[in-house]
Image (cartoon, grey):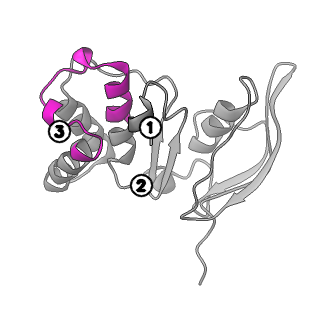
Amino acid sequence: MPLAPAIETHELRKVFGDNAAVKSLTLQIQQGEVFGFLGPNGAGKTTSIKMLVGLIAPTSGKASLLGAPLGDLATRACIGFLPEHFRFQDWLTAREFLVLHGNLYGMDRSRLNTRIDQLLERVGLSGFRDKALVTFSKGMLQRIGLAQALLNSPGLVFLDEPTSGLDPVAAF
């Protein structure tokens, strides 16, 4: 049996007053594919992502994530998200920040601790686990944000401007 598409939209639309931020988004992205929105500022990229992750409701159209309609709570638990302008609890250490988010996901403590170690290593911050986020550079904050988005081993990840603040080597 084939897997449901990771993302499927049909004529998704979002209007703010007289402005149609997203006019008619129709696409199908299969699980395992990597997809990116490209376009100038104001093209509707962030608005599209916000609709898909459930932060704003579409004006019209239909969409599903992992085979479930937008807003499905069980599906939301399978999604990782890093917004463009993430607000960090900068008084926390890197580890405390990830523990907080792991607790929000309801992750088992043992699994959470293992996952934190893996992700801090993966994003190059294992040596900063006990440093307060307030001491992090913009690039380091972006990397801890990426770790947060991957913390729950999501089936689908949304990254809005994921390379913002990263040097060319860290971005790729």
Q: Which mark is residue 126?
A: 3
Tally the numbered discs: 3
Give the CA separation, mark 1 to mark 2.
20 Å
Q: Secondary structure at mark 1?
A: helix
Q: Nearer the viewer, residue 40 or 13?
A: 40
Residue tagged 1: 171
Q: Which mark is residue 19?
A: none
* Residue 39, magenta (yes or no): no
Q: Residues within 10 Å of mark 1 (few under 14, many from 20)?
A: few
Residue tagged 2: 154
In the orientation shown, which residue stands out farthest toward the right? 18
**Would you say the residues marked 1 and 2 are in contact, meaning their CB atoms lie under 8 Å apart?**
no
Q: Residues within 10 Å of mark 2 (few under 14, many from 20)?
A: some
Q: Residues within 10 Å of mark 3 (few under 14, many from 20)?
A: some
Residue at point 62% right, 44% down? 52
Q: Secondary structure at mark 3?
A: helix
* In this view, 109 is above or below 142: below
Residue at point 19% right, 56% down? 111
* Residue 131, magenta (yes or no): yes
Span of residues in magenta: 121-145
3 or 1: mark nearer the eye? 1
Residue at point 57% right, 42% down? 53
What amino acid is at disc 1?
Ala
Query: Horizontal placement of 25 versus 169: left or right?
Result: right
Q: Nearer the viewer, residue 40 or 28?
A: 40
Which is more N-terminal, label 1 or label 3? 3
